[in-house]
Amino acid sequence: MAPENASSDLSSEMELDAFRRLFPLRFHERHLIESIRPDGRPLGNARDTTLALGAVASASGSALAKIGCTTMLAAIKMEVMTPTPESPDEGCIAIDFHMPPICSPIVRPGRPAEVAPVIGKQLSDTILSSGMINLKELSLVGGKAAWMAYLDIYCLDADGALFDTALLSAVAAFSHLQIPAVSLNDDGRVVVVSDENGGKLKEEPVNKEKRKLKLSRIPFSLTCILHKNYILADPTAEEESIMETLVTVVLDSSYQLVSLNKPGGPALAYMPAVQGCIALTRQRVKELQKILDESISDREVD
């Protein structure tokens, strides 16, 4: 009996897998009727989320973020620059988002992923408009020197909700960031203080030791799929490919709306569902803030 049961189970599993491949939308809709996802999640639940700060030893700030299988590595490099005449007492932030071929079978060598620049711009707009970082904190000498923070985010595994994971990795990297100590050398130029030059500098350091960047109104996001009367939080790549109406809500740590993005389609028809997405995002912000706080505490203990 055991071999026959095993053979029957295997046959059923193969039939289910074939049905999923041939009729993916019908396969998922059968689960929606039961208010559950193929991976066992309730419709409004996000996948397991983890953070690791200091993932890149050579960076001034870094983090590895995972939401389900989607994985992002963020690293910040600090360089001294001359501020612009329009903002003489402010530094700058430059963000690049990368999707190497290793992250997904749809990304081919030599052909950059079309979605990469879209996510990169969305990240820049979100971080700058949220008010998380006061650019004046990146000033060193008014009109003469300021910090340029280069943030590079690499997608290591693309399995849906790319923006949410990328934003989380960026926020975590800035939370981990330590701004180097700098001073003026004999030529009056700003230099990073090191063990070698610390005792030979003409002036007192502009900042005597490494310091953390003060963050406020930290943004977190949740992407949802709207399909018929259903709202699916934190979609996988498979879900995104067959149910195309996406809504990404960004709230700050005080639950104030930072942005809402729904590419294409009539906006008014989805307003009740959008309100549902915002409510789910409020819950998600609590989860992500707790994960971030625990990661920072663990890092400080280490």
Image (cartoon, grey):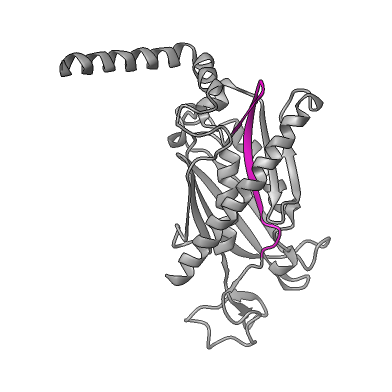
Q: Residue at x 51, y 22 (%)?
A: 31
Q: Residue at x 66, y 20 (%)?
A: 228
Q: In the rendering, at what x and y percent does residue 267 appear?
A: 79, 27
- Nearest the viewer among 264 and 185 is 264
Above or below residue 259? Residue 268 is above
Above or below residue 260? Residue 193 is below
Look at the image and say whether residue 223 sits in the magenta stretch.
yes
Q: In the rendering, at what x and y percent does residue 172 appear?
A: 56, 57
Placement of the N terminus among the 4 image quadrants = top left
- Nearest the viewer among 139 and 188 is 139
Look at the image and say whether residue 285 sits in the magenta stretch.
no
Predominant SS of the magenta segment: strand
Quadrant hosting residue 143? bottom right
Left or right: where does residue 56 sit relative to residue 11?
A: right
- Nearest the viewer among 51 and 48 is 48
Q: Residue at x 49, y 31 (%)?
A: 110
Q: Residue at x 54, y 40 (%)?
A: 46
Residue 121 seen anywhere in this rendered image of the structure: no
Magenta stretch, residue numbers: 215-232
Q: In the rendering, at what x and y percent does residue 242 appear?
A: 56, 20
Quadrant hosting residue 302? bottom left
Quadrant hosting residue 223? top right
Above or below residue 195? Residue 55 is above
Looking at the image, how many numbered discs can be counted on the residues?
0
